[in-house]
Amino acid sequence: MEKVMIVEDDFKIAEHLRSYISKYGYQVFVAEDFGDLMAEFQREEPDIVLLDINLPRYDGYYWCRQIRKVSICPVIFISARTGEMDQVMALENGGDDFITKPFHPDIVMAKIRSQLRRAYGEYAAKYEERVLVKEGLKLFPERLELRFGDRVAMLTKKETDIIERLFERHPRVAGREDLLENLWVDQSYVDENTLNVNMARVRKKFQELGIEGAVETVRGAGYRLRITWKEGK
C-alpha cells in the first residue's frame, strides 16, 4: 500500500485530502510538526508528498530541497499561488508537479497515480544501483554510503563525489584542479581551503570504518587513494 504524506497547514484542506485519498486504498498521514518536517518524513518514509508552499517557519520550496537531499520520491506542490514563476520555482526546487487551489480532488488523484506510476510502476526507469568496490571497501553513490565489512559511514554529497573520484583515478593522483572542476561548478566562489576542509572530512569517514591513511596528499599535485587495508581484515 503506497503512503501519501500531506504537508498543509490549513486543517480543513488537509483533512479533506486525507479523507478523499484514503478512500482509494492509500495510506495517508498529515504532517503536524512544521518546524521539523524532515523528522516526520524520515520516520514515515512516504512514497509521495503533497506539499503546500505557504507554511509556518519555512516555505514548501525549502522543505522540497531538504527532501531532495535524502529521497527522490515524487513531490506535488498544491498552492493557491497561480503565477507562472511560482510553478517554475516549484519545479526548480525539486518538485515534480503543481496543482493550483481550489482544486478538484479527482485531479489530485489522477496526478498522484501518474507520479506513482512514473516513480515505481510501469513507467519507472529500470536500472541497477551503482557500487564501486576496492578491496572490500564499497561506495554506494546513490545511498551516500561507504561500507567496509559490517561498518557503515554516512556521507554528504560532496564527500561521496570526492571518494568516487578517488576510486576512479586510483592508482593515479586526483589533481586539485580536477577535483575542484568536477565538484564545484563555479570555482570563483570556492575558498582556497574548501577542498582541504572537505578532504579532512573524507579522511574522518575512512577512520569511522577503522581505516587509517586511506587518502594520501601528493604535494603540488593532489590526492591519491592508498590501499592500506585488505578485504576481510
Image (cartoon, rainbow, N blue to C red):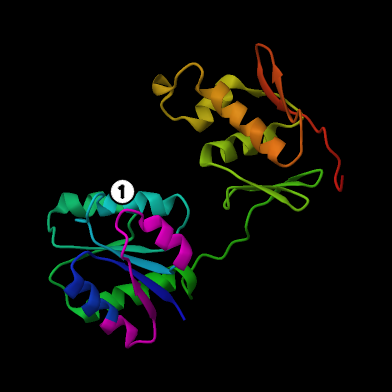
Q: How many marks?
A: 1
Q: Residue at x 66, y 15 (%)?
A: 221
From this viewpoint, is residue 213 visible? Answer: yes
**111 above or below 73?**
below
Residue 130 on image: x %, y %: 64, 53
At horizontal 18% and vertical 52% (from top left) the residue drawn is 86
229 left or right, relative to 176: right
Q: Is residue 45 visible?
A: no
Q: Is residue 97 left or right of residue 67?
A: left
Residue 7 location, quadrant: bottom left
x and y percent of residue 196 in the render?
A: 57, 21
Q: Is residue 31 magenta?
A: yes
- Location of residue 74 (image quadrant): bottom left
Q: Which residue is at the front of the view, 119 or 196?
A: 196
Please say if 39 is above or below 158. Answer: below
Residues in magenta, as a range: 19-45
Of helix, strand and loop, which one carries label 1? helix
Q: Pick the quarter of the image with the C terminus.
A: top right
| Residue at position x 28%, y 51% in the image | 61
- Between 70 and 39, the one lying in front of the other is 39
- Is residue 100 covered in magenta? no
Percent across and percent down for residue 79 are 18, 62
Residue 115 lies left or right of residue 220; in this view the side is: left
x then y, percent, for residue 12: 17, 75
Q: Is residue 172 left or right of residue 25?
A: right
Residue 175 lies, with reference to residue 185, above or below; the image says above
Q: Amino acid at mark 1?
A: Tyr
The residue located at (42%, 74%) in the rendering is 3
Q: Which residue is mark 1?
A: 62
Mark 1 burial class by Cα count in 10 Å: few <14, some 14-19, many 20+: few
